[in-house]
Image (tube, rainbow, N blue to C red):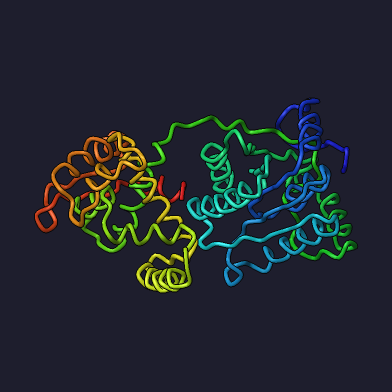
Amino acid sequence: MNDKTSNYTIREKTNDLQKNMENMKNKGSRVHIAVLGYELDRITEVPIEIRTDKVYIITRNEDKESPEAVKFLNECINRLEDNKIKTFIRRNEPLNLENIIVEMKKIIKFEKMNEVREIYINVSSGSSVGAIAGTICAMLFSDENTKITPYYVIPNEHYENLSDEEKLKKQENYRKLGYDGIMPRSFGVYGIEYVTPFNISLPDEKLMIFAKRIYEMERESEYGVSMKKIAKLVIETKESQNLIKLITEPENKEEEEYNKKLMEDLLKKYKKLDYGENEILTMIEENYTILKWRKMRMGIEKGDEENIKRLQREKPEPVDYVWLKQNVISKLQKWEMIEIPEDRIGGYKRVKLTKKGEDLVKYLY
């Protein structure tokens, strides 16, 4: 790594910047995430220096990438793989705030499943939108098991600050290395600066599941979701009892075949949402979580067959609407995640997600 520090940044030079690199190097298994921009050293040097395990690069769909972006991406991949770092490309279009968060969220969830303890997000490699997305993801998804840390790479030199002679020399040196694209915006790494993510307060998991179901139902109707449809989530219909079988081991071949046919029907039903088997199984588990939550709030214990039957019906009753309003609707309103328009659907009140509610669902799920 180049130790020269001319024209590197407006920040003061401090030993802390190099210490941050050493601290990062001393951590265990590491994963890095970066959004592709017109940078090379800023994306590759830190993972190479600290001998990281894996790097994800988020970029646009192949048919939308400029020739220059393709050259930057290929060079990043070559540098990382030459240093035996596993490199994965994640694509989305358009590469806006929402889609960058979606891709980062997928990566973080996958790595959490693999019990990765440290995830770093490079917020200096792409646009300011990528930096905002990285910081938001660190605030939303960092927890006691997996720490997510955004970091900013401070370069040794900025291309725009070089003299014409220095620019030509840089171009010649890069061509000798086989790179013939436009010049990166910066060179070398002076150090890294951590961006401290603050904890943010989020709605309870069960409330978010209701918001997610409302979001899914709203995609079928622009007029909102009737309270009757939402209330069906807090009772144990025959359909919900059958669906729960999909998340339990089949007891025999007949049950296995029944589950297979049921999943085929569900894939057709949720085709518009682009849901595969994993998404459908997650939805069933979430709905089961809601039912368990209601039983717990009502003091119904496992094996209490008499009281369990109180929730086993095909249509919601007045008591279900009362429970729903007290425990879910009023709380989602306090979070400003839903609104209840005056007009009704088929005689039932309807619920619509607000922009805040939609964004939270998109970001968290």
The part of the image, by quadrant, that contains residue 38 is bottom right
At which x and y percent is residue 62? 61, 70
Q: What number of labels is visible? A: 0
At which x and y percent is residue 318? 13, 44
Please tell me which residue lies in front, 177 or 240: 240
Left or right of 347 on screen, residue 306: right
Residue at image position (23%, 35%) is 326
The part of the image, by quadrant, that contains residue 254 is bottom left
Residue at image position (69%, 47%) is 32
The part of the image, by quadrant, that contains residue 238 is bottom left
Left or right of 201 on screen, residue 326: left
Residue at image position (82%, 46%) is 51
Please tell me which residue lies in front, 255 or 149: 255
Please tell me which residue lies in front, 31 or 174: 31
Please tell me which residue lies in front, 273 or 316: 316
Q: Residue furthest left?
A: 347
**Above or below: residue 210 compared with residue 323:** below
